Image: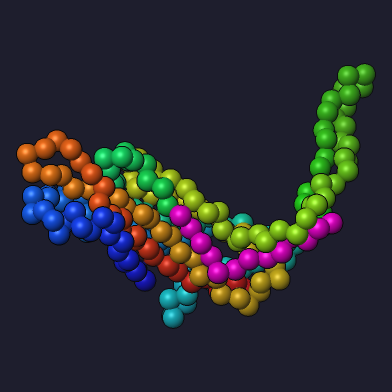
Amino acid sequence: MKFLKFFFLFFFILSCSNNITFIDNGDDITIEFLEGLNEDPNFKLSKDVNGFYRLKLDRNRNQTIQRITGRLIRNDGRPIETLSGGLRQKVEFSSNLYWWLLKGDTVANITNTFINPLTGELVYTNLPPLINWRDVLVPTINQSSYTDDNTGVFNTVIAPIRNMEGDTMKITAEYVHSITAQEEDSNFFSTIGQKIIKDSVYVILE
């Protein structure tokens, strides 16, 4: 499922001059999630007949970690190269699911390990747990990453919690492309707008 949304800034530049040449308006850019949502065959998610992916939650942990992979490329397969950003492009991610980490909840249990210099034994010491000091709304997806220079592949991580069993997670990847143009008989390039390119998938949490 792909959505395109256009934002044109300084549109009066185009209306006042016929000497503008578009250098890159992003029409040939595609953003998509890989089949199975992962490039590693061992961690691909299955898809049902309705096109929804399915993720089995880990009942022994609060969060289930799953890498999500996609690709941002030109239609001919080349990675995107821009005048301002080079080959590595930033991709933003969002999810419709969040959870509360409450004040007083244990964030992590910390164990210190060291070699006893007298006995040569490995010693484990449990340190005081790390306690959350305020209520925090926690997203279920890392919010951004960068594409690979050579392939345009990007990765993020989702981490739904076990209480979300039965929920459907909507994952959206978004790339903001700067539209560049050049005035006639000039070496000056300018950004005259932005084009937002999105792709979304759905994951049923089981």
Query: Which residue is depicted at the point 43% across and 76% down?
Result: 51
Q: What is the magenta range?
A: 92-104
Query: Which residue is depicted at the point 60% across and 68% down?
Result: 97
185 versus 95 height, above or below:
above
117 versus 20 height, above or below:
above
Q: Quadrant of residue 169?
A: bottom right
Left or right: residue 77 versus residue 54 is left
Residue farthest along the top direction in this orientation: 118
The verdict on residue 130 being magenta is: no
Q: Quadrant of residue 196?
A: bottom left
Residue farthest along the bottom direction in this orientation: 50
Quadrant of the rendering where the C terminus is positioned: bottom right
Q: Is residue 39 visible?
A: no
Where residue 48 sits in the image (x, y, percent)?
47, 77
Quadrant of the rendering where the N terminus is positioned: bottom left
Where residue 151 sits in the image (x, y, percent)?
33, 45
164 versus 6 height, above or below:
below
The verdict on residue 97 being magenta is: yes
Where residue 39 sits in the image (x, y, percent)?
44, 54
- 94 or 204, which is in the foreground? 94
Left or right: residue 163 versus residue 148 is right
Give the main secondary structure of the magenta stretch.
strand
Query: Which residue is depicted at the point 87% across and 40% down?
Result: 127
Left or right: residue 17 versus residue 144 is left
